[in-house]
Image (spheres, rainbow, N blue to C red):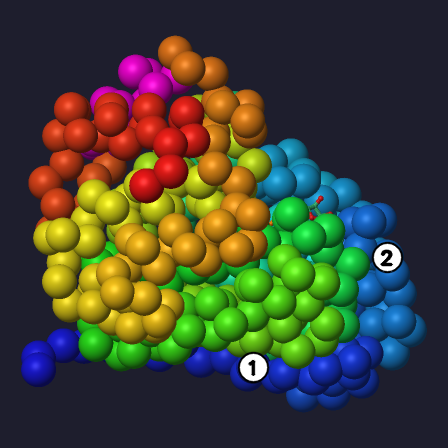
Amino acid sequence: MRFTHTTLPQRVVFAPRDAPRAVAREAGRLGARRVLLIASRRAAAAADPIAAELPVVRRHEEVVMHVPAEVADRARAAAADARADTLVTVGGGSATGLGKAVALTTGLPLLAVPTTYAGSEATNVWGLTEGGTKTTGVDDAVLPRAVVHDAALLTSLPTALAVASGLNALAHCVDSMWGPRADPIDRALATEGIRALAAGLPALARNGGGLEGIEQTLYGAHLAAVSFASAGSGLHHRICHVLGGMFDLPHAQTHAVVLPHVLALNAPHAPEAEGRIAAALGAPTAVAGLAALRARVGAPHALREHGMPEEGIARAVAPILAAVPEGNPAPVTEENLTALLYAAWRGERG
Ligand code: NAD
C-alpha cells in the first residue's frame, strides 16, 4: 500500500438529548465569550435551549440554501457589528455553510450542531452562490473546530426529507470509493458508513426512527462526510453540482435520485468498491443492494419531480463532461451520460 491520508483536526461529540450542555462545554473549550448564533427561525426549537446555555451576543436567522453572497455579507457584518469571537450554527447544511462563509473571511472559530445528514460540518469545503453560479473552495479556516451531534434534534425532520438527506450521506460514501483522492482509509470509513446508514434509514422511514434509528443514520452520515472530505468529489457529486446549480434543484433529493444511476455506471468497472458496497448493504451486488434499500425507504426517484426541465438534459451534458474527474472507473461519454441523465430525469428504476 502506498498512499497519503490527511485526517482533519476536529472534536466530534455525540451527546444524545444533551446538545445544550455539550455545546456549552465545547464553546467553553474554544474560549467563547461573544457568540454569534446562526440558526433559521425554523430551527428555533433546536436552537433556543442551546442559546440559553451560551454567551450569545447576536442571533442571525437569515439562512438560505447554497449561501448567496449577499446573505454571507450580512452575516459577516452581523459578526463584526456584534464583535463576536465564536460562531455557533444550529441547522442543516445551509446553516453550517453560512457559518463557514463567515469563518472564511473572519477566521472566527466555528462550532456546528447539525440537524440534517448533509455532513458539511465534517469538511473544510465552503460554497458561495453569486449570480446563479456556485463557487466552492477548500480552506481549513472553515472546518468547524467542534461538532456536537444530538439525535434528538433530528426528530423534527420530516420523513421524506430525512430519507433524502440520509441517501445524500450514502452518496458521500459511494463517491468516496472512487473520488479523486480516495485511499484505503476513506474506503474503510465509507464501508462502515454504508453499513450504519443501511441499518438506520429503514428505521427512519418506518416510524421516524426513534432516537436509535436517527443515531445510526447520524453516525453513518458522519463517517460518510469524513471519508468524502478526504476522497474528494467523484462523478456523482460532479453531476449533482452541475444539475443543482443549473436548475436550482433541492440538494438532498437530487443526490438521492442520481446515486443509483452513477452506481450502475461505475460498479462494473470498480470491482473492489462494488464488493465493499454490496457487502455493507448485505446484498449480492451493490446495485441490487441499493435498489432494495431505496425501495424500503421510499426514496425519491425522478428529477422531473424536483424541478428539472427535460430540455435541461441536453444543456447539462457538456458542463458535466468537462467536470468528470480523472480516473473515474467507467469511461464517461456524451452517449452514456445522456442516457444516465434521462434515466434519472424520468425515474427509471435501475
Ligand atoms: P438545509 O440545511 O437547507 O435544510 C433543508 C430544509 O430542512 C430546510 O428547510 C431546513 O429549515 C429544514 N430542516 C433542517 N433541519 C431540520 C430539522 N431537524 N427539523 C425540521 N426541519 C429541518 O439542507 P441540507 O440538505 O441539510 O444541506 C444542503 C446544503 O449544504 C447545500 O447548500 C449543500 O451544497 C451544502 N453542503 C455542503 C457540504 C460541504 O462540505 N461544504 C456538504 C454537504 C452539503
The residue that label 2 is drawn on is 44
Q: Residues within 10 Å of mark 2 (few under 14, many from 20)?
A: some
What crowding class fits label 1: few (fewer than 14 Cα within 10 Å), some (14-19), or many (20 or more)? Answer: some
Respond yes or no on whether mark 1 lies under 8 Å from ligand 1: no
**What residue is rendered at 83% in x and 72% in y?**
50
Q: Is residue 99 left or right of residue 158?
A: left
Q: Estimate the spatial distance between the alpha carbons at disc 1 and disc 2, rounded to whole Å.
A: 23 Å
> Residue at horizontal 15%, vertical 24%?
335
In the rendered structure, the answer to whether residue 52 lies left or right of residue 89 reads right
| Rendering coords of residue 96 (x, y %) | 62, 57
Label 1 amino acid? Answer: Val
Q: Which mark is residue 12?
A: 1
Q: Is residue 318 magenta?
A: yes
Question: Can residue 224 be found in the magenta stretch?
Answer: no
Boundaries of the magenta span: 312-322
**Residue 37 horizontal side relative to residue 313, left or right:** right
- Badge 2 amino acid: Ala
Helix, strand or loop for disc 1: strand
Question: Residue 101: which disc?
Answer: none
| Residue 65 is at least partly visible in this image | yes
Question: In the picture shown, does residue 285 fall above or below 75?
Answer: below
Residue 25 picture quarter: bottom right
Residue 77: x and y in percent read 72, 47
Q: Nearer the viewer, residue 97 or 119?
A: 119
Q: Answer above or below: position of 347 versus 188.
A: above
